[in-house]
Image: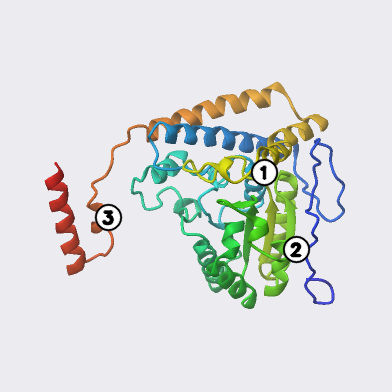
């Protein structure tokens, strides 16, 4: 909030600390304050995320995964946000947060198990203070608010982060979560990756406000637009929101303006609803080469950095492939056996009917 207690309206111009050509953009308010080692690690995380993303797509094309939603183009938005959080800050992801999972140390094989359809109950996620992926649009925002309220009740200073897309801001669950978080001033950050498309619906057809961040004023919380292809800006803006939340000053709505370079999922054909010129324009703003140019200007780039990325990506991709390729499927009856501690008569009847149908098909 401002000094007089009012809530400032979001600036339509996104916060930017790195220009597309890699040159630094001075900003008196946002100062990342990262060391050379931290900057290089941030680049490595972005590059490894893209490498793993490619491997996930390959595995789906080879019939090893049921589906996969690429995060190509959104690596800066994810790496910058994740780097501003503590290990005990709870994450409530949607389904496109591969970079966040990697930053938190979640095994890519556990992510692969989810997209293969293998039951694993969020194993590997919750141990890292990360909720399982949320496929329903926007429901995780409510869970994040609940976790933030619980942290306050327990006397903790952890922060909850709800990762949502621009399309989720059209969902009722997100409206309720934003309103509840503001009313009770909970330590929750709503991190919206505006990648311009909710499947085939452009962001311009999803709202009439000047931007998603401008909606924050209606809930009574600060809203900030940030260049989602600028990893330093994403880090700095999230860091400020985290500081506010830990100080008991309530939630923040962050709109990271970025772009989904690939399809919505591997089942989607984006050429049916967006033109090549738009993709080319956003490809020129790709966050990876932008950050590499910045590191070169700072004298921090070396062949060793690229060599580490090459070696680490080979290990991660091989590990993912080993974990996923031809992994055994669990019994189909598990969908009935792990719903309730004591199976209900109706569920038991359905299980029997389903088992009989499987037997007839053998």
Give the number of the mark in front: 2 or 3. 2
Q: Looking at the image, which residue is at 80% across and 76% down?
A: 6
Q: Which residue is mark 1?
A: 76
Sort mark 2 into few (<14), some (14-19) or many (20+) by Cα contacts within 10 Å: few
Label 2 and label 3: CA atoms lie apart by 45 Å
Quarter location, residue 176? bottom right
Which of marks 3 and 2 precedes in the sequence?
A: 2
Give the number of the mark in front: 1 or 2. 2
Label 1 and label 2: CA atoms lie apart by 24 Å
Q: Quadrant of the N terminus?
A: bottom right
Q: Which residue is mark 3?
A: 335
Horizontally, residue 108 falls left or right of residue 72, namely left
Q: Does the image show residue 343?
A: no
Label 1 and label 3: CA atoms lie apart by 37 Å
Image position, residue 20 (x, y; %):
79, 39
Q: Looking at the image, which residue is at 69% across and 42% down?
A: 278
Image position, residue 78 (x, y; %):
62, 47
Which numbered disc covers residue 207? none
Q: Quadrant of the C terminus?
A: top left
Horizontally, residue 324 falls left or right of residue 329, namely right
Which of marks 3 and 1 precedes in the sequence?
A: 1
Image position, residue 127 (x, y; %):
45, 52
Q: Tell me if residue 308 comes above or below residue 146 in the rendering.
A: above
Q: Element type at marker 1?
A: helix
Q: Which residue is mark 2?
A: 210
Sort mark 1 into few (<14), some (14-19) or many (20+) by Cα contacts within 10 Å: many
Q: Does the image show residue 126?
A: yes
Q: Nearer the viewer, residue 218 or 129?
A: 218
Quarter location, residue 179? bottom right
């Amino acid at each position: 909030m401002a000094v007089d207690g009012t809530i400032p309206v979001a600036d339509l111009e996104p916060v930017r600390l790195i220009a597309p050509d890699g040159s630094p953009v001075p900003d008196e308010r946002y100062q990342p304050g990262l060391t050379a080692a931290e900057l290089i690690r941030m680049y490595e995380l972005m590059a490894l995320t893209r490498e793993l993303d490619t491997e996930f797509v390959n595995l789906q094309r080879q019939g090893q995964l049921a589906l996969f939603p690429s995060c190509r183009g959104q690596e800066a938005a994810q790496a910058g946000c994740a780097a501003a959080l503590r290990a005990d800050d709870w994450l409530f992801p949607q389904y496109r947060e591969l970079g966040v999972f990697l930053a938190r140390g979640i095994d890519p094989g556990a992510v692969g198990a989810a997209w293969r359809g293998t039951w694993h109950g969020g194993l590997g996620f919750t141990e890292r203070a990360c909720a399982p992926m949320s496929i329903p649009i926007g429901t995780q925002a409510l869970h994040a608010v609940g976790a933030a309220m619980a942290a306050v009740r327990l006397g903790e200073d952890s922060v909850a982060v709800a990762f949502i897309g621009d399309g989720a801001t059209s969902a009722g669950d997100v409206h309720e979560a934003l309103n509840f978080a503001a009313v009770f001033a909970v330590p929750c950050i709503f991190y919206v990756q505006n990648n311009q498309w909710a499947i085939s619906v452009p962001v311009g057809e999803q709202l009439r406000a000047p931007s998603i961040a401008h909606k924050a004023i209606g809930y009574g919380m600060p809203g900030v637009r940030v260049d989602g292809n600028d990893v330093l800006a994403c880090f700095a803006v999230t860091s400020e929101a985290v500081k506010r939340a830990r100080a008991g000053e309530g939630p923040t709505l962050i709109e990271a303006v970025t772009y989904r370079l690939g399809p919505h999922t591997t089942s989607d054909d984006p050429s049916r609803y967006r033109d090549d010129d738009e993709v080319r324009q956003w490809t020129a703003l790709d966050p990876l080469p932008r950050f590499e140019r910045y590191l070169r200007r700072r004298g921090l780039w070396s062949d060793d950095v690229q060599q580490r990325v090459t070696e680490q990506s080979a290990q991660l991709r091989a590990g993912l492939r080993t974990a996923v390729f031809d992994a055994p499927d669990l019994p189909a009856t598990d969908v009935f056996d792990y719903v309730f501690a004591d199976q209900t008569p109706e569920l038991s009847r359905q299980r029997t009917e389903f088992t009989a149908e499987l037997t007839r098909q053998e």
